[in-house]
Image (tube, rainbow, N blue to C red):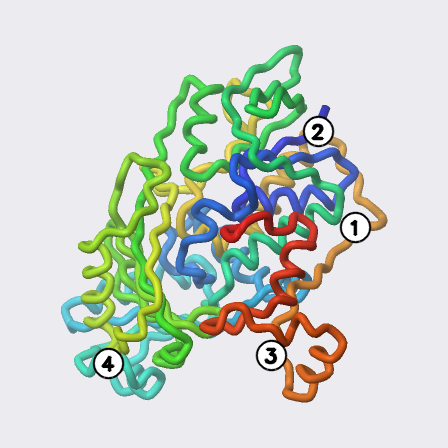
Amino acid sequence: MYDVIIIGSGVSGSAAARELSRYKVKVCVLEKEEDVCCGTSKANSGIVHAGYDAKEGSLMAKLNVRGNAMMEQLSKELDFPFQRVGSLVICLREEDMDKLQALYDRGVANGVPGLQILNREEVLEMEPNIVDNVYAALYAPSAGIVCPFGLNIAMAENACENGVEFKFDTKVQRLGKKDDIWEIYTNQGVFKTKYVVNAAGVYADKFHNMVSEKKIHITPRRGDYCLLDKTAGAHVSKTIFALPNEFGKGILVTPTAHGNLLLGPTAIDIEEKEGTNTTREGLDQVLTKAGQNVKDIPMRQVITSFAGLRAHEEGHEFIIEEVENAKGFIDCAGIESPGLTSSPAIGEMVAGILKEKLYLEEKENFIATRKGILDPNILTKEERVTLIKEKPAYGNIICRCEMITEGEIIDAIHRPLGAKSLDG
């Protein structure tokens, strides 16, 4: 019997688990895959959005700005890659300046700090590889880049160290309620709990609709990406966006937290909740659109492509609330972009809802920090030599593209919630 069961171990579920692990409550996370971060959370842009795009006054806007503000301290506590590099939304035509101004005004209303509209000369001085016909750009210095799976794994590992149980390969089949206790039926048996947090990504509508007469629909929105080698990583220093449209923020060009260059995503609505295949049309669109905003991208340096799914809800708003007429069932649904940015704040909000329901007593021995996997590439030559003498596995390079060593792989396997396969 648990106090809280969380369905899903993506960034939202893991953030909620970490926040709840501060308290003396019995928490369990059910995950249908073999590891955390196997859905939307592992295949996205890795952008910490500033917060100018979300509708003024929306929950999405509030949590975006709050999550952005939390990210730097969280990265220090949990030791995952994060850099506040800033972003530019570029405008190519004078007639589109009203759209750029609207983004600026919305950002100011949302509380985004430091926004500026730059002219052509200022843009090209900041980013020389932006196309020459750029007219202006919105500069957001608070935007950043993060390792999405690094963030997700860090929060989950820290939650685990603080007593949260994780049940992998555990697929939820149906839910029931008996005498104010939720019964969650899975392929691994029945789990009982006082409260359920539905953080199931593209499957969140399935579980919501099992318990509520007011139905929601989550549309998987597929996005194709191209990843370039680290030799191309310095082509831009900031995240470069086009003006957004009704399908999202468009094709971006960004450095990654690991030093690569990332292009994408497309935005194709599908109904297949596991449809993460790339398409020739999608990848062609990524390469074409990226080249319309940033010149001389070394396309020959593309080393892989992938696709991810965003959990798009038709209201384009986060749904984080107790479901009406389903006491004890907390939705955490419709978490699409800027969900990664917002995840620390989403965790706070979910814990806040449960504080009103449960008596949450803080632990005296809560572990606030976690040490990530050692990256030998950030060490000095002398430090690497010393490390290899002490631990020879760090001198055996397994992946020569990314310079991953045997020592890092062994660490990943033997950590809390350690990797069980080449995918996880």
Q: What's the residue type where badge 3 is placed?
A: Ile
Q: Nearer the viewer, residue 391 or 282?
A: 391
The span from disc 4 to disc 1 (Cα, nearest Å) is 50 Å
Residue 189 relative to residue 292: left or right:
right
Q: Quadrant of residue 230?
A: bottom left
Vertical arrangement, residue 215 with respect to residue 134, above or below = above
Q: Circle 3 is placed at which residue position? A: 378
Residues at circles 4 and 2 in contact by the CB criterion of under 8 Å: no
Say which label, 3 or 4, has the lower sequence index: 4
Q: Nearer the viewer, mark 4 or mark 1?
A: 4
Q: Circle 2 is placed at which residue position? A: 3
Q: Residues within 10 Å of mark 2 (few under 14, many from 20)?
A: some
Q: Residues within 10 Å of mark 4 (few under 14, many from 20)?
A: few
Check the picture and name the quadrant holding the N terminus: top right
Q: What's the residue type where badge 2 is placed?
A: Asp
Q: Circle 4 is placed at which residue position? A: 296
Q: Residues within 10 Å of mark 1 (few under 14, many from 20)?
A: some
Residue 159 relative to residue 302: left or right:
right
Using the image, tell me which numbered label, if any, was put on residue 366.
1
The span from disc 3 to disc 1 (Cα, nearest Å) is 29 Å
The span from disc 2 to disc 3 (Cα, nearest Å) is 42 Å
The residue depicted at 73 percent of the width and 73 percent of the height is 391
Residues at circles 2 and 3 in contact by the CB criterion of under 8 Å: no
Q: What's the residue type where badge 1 is placed?
A: Phe
